[in-house]
Image (cartoon, rainbow, N blue to C red):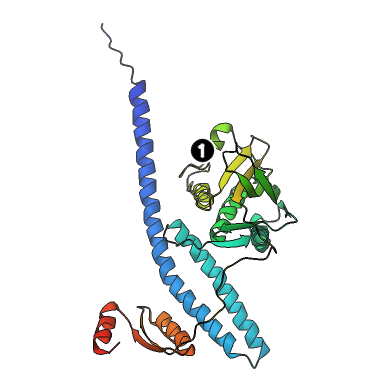
Amino acid sequence: MAFTAIDVTDLKRKDSELLAIQEKLLQAQKMGAIGRLAGGIAHHFNNILTIILGNCELIMKSGFRDPKSEIRVKEIKETAEKAKDFIAQLLTFSRKRVTQMQTININDLLSKMENMIRRIIGDTIEFFISFSKEPLMAHVDPSQIEQAIMNIVVNAVDAMPNGGKLTIETSSVMLGENSELGTGPHVMIAITDTGQGMSEGIRKRIFEPFFTTKEPGKGTGLGLSITHEIIKRSGGYIDVNSNPGFGSTFLIYLPLVPNQNGSLMKQEDENVMFGSERILLVEDDRGVRKLISELLCNLGYKVIEAGNPMEALSIYESLNF
């Protein structure tokens, strides 16, 4: 009796690799669709928030007879601003958000995030935060840096299912010419947990898109890859030190911006421009259009409204601009 043996090891390996590639492609297509959906929802919701925030500003400028009314309007405004920050994160995820770079004190940013972090980590995890004594100024998009830090915090919480300790520290460091991170003064944010830690193999892959060690349905593998992209776009660098059973430390480095007084250096033009010219305003959202029109009229401008480009063109042709 004759037998024929064929070694199918390579074929199985190739089939396995092909299936893995197909699975990643399907996952990428699915996340792309979710991203487009998130971007569409965020755009419409942003219009709603613009109307809410704009009318709050108008009410606050007109003054209050009842102190309680002022408190209520301020609460509405603060809540709407929080919702706007959340929408900014959705737009970042969908890659449709325009980056809004500002020079800010990283210590101030983390201080504002402290209560939110405490709510997320729960009662089983101890939380410690330590700021450098000097202001740490960096030119970043605040909402995106918040998102990057929260992604790391959420992963730290997942790594400590039975509780533990989370520590966030800030300091300034001087990087030498031989550093792969760049040279000169940098802001360093160190986020340390006492969780399960990672092997060297996992540590090297954690910033890869769709890479996750979580159970199916428990994570997309996008959180840390988005974090890596945000820090990179900010001109910085992120690294992680970890060993199995000994927790992890994420290190974020951002170029330090010299600052004289340490105050928040958000650039805002305080010179409001008044005028008497005519303005043709084109906006398809009626609520946003009415709000902008009222704001411009309050500054002395004569506003002509149009709901779409064709209407605007018709108005333009009928008027002598």
> What x and y, as percent, mark residue 248?
64, 41
Query: Does residue 119 show up?
Result: no
> What x and y, as percent, mark residue 286?
38, 82
State the image quarter where residue 78 is shown: bottom right
Quadrant of the rendering where the C terminus is positioned: bottom left
User: What kind of residue is marked 1?
Assistant: Arg
Name, please, the residue furthest toward the right.
133
> What x and y, as percent, mark residue 310?
25, 79
In terms of secondary structure, where does tag 1 sit?
A: loop
The residue depicted at 52 percent of the width and 69 percent of the height is 84
Q: Is residue 4 above or below residue 189?
A: above
Give the labeled residue for mark 1. 205
The residue depicted at 39 percent of the width and 88 percent of the height is 303
Front in this rendered view, residue 79 or 266: 266
The residue depicted at 49 percent of the width and 49 percent of the height is 229
Front in this rendered view, residue 205 or 290: 290
Quadrant of the rendering where the N terminus is positioned: top left
Q: How many labels, in total?
A: 1
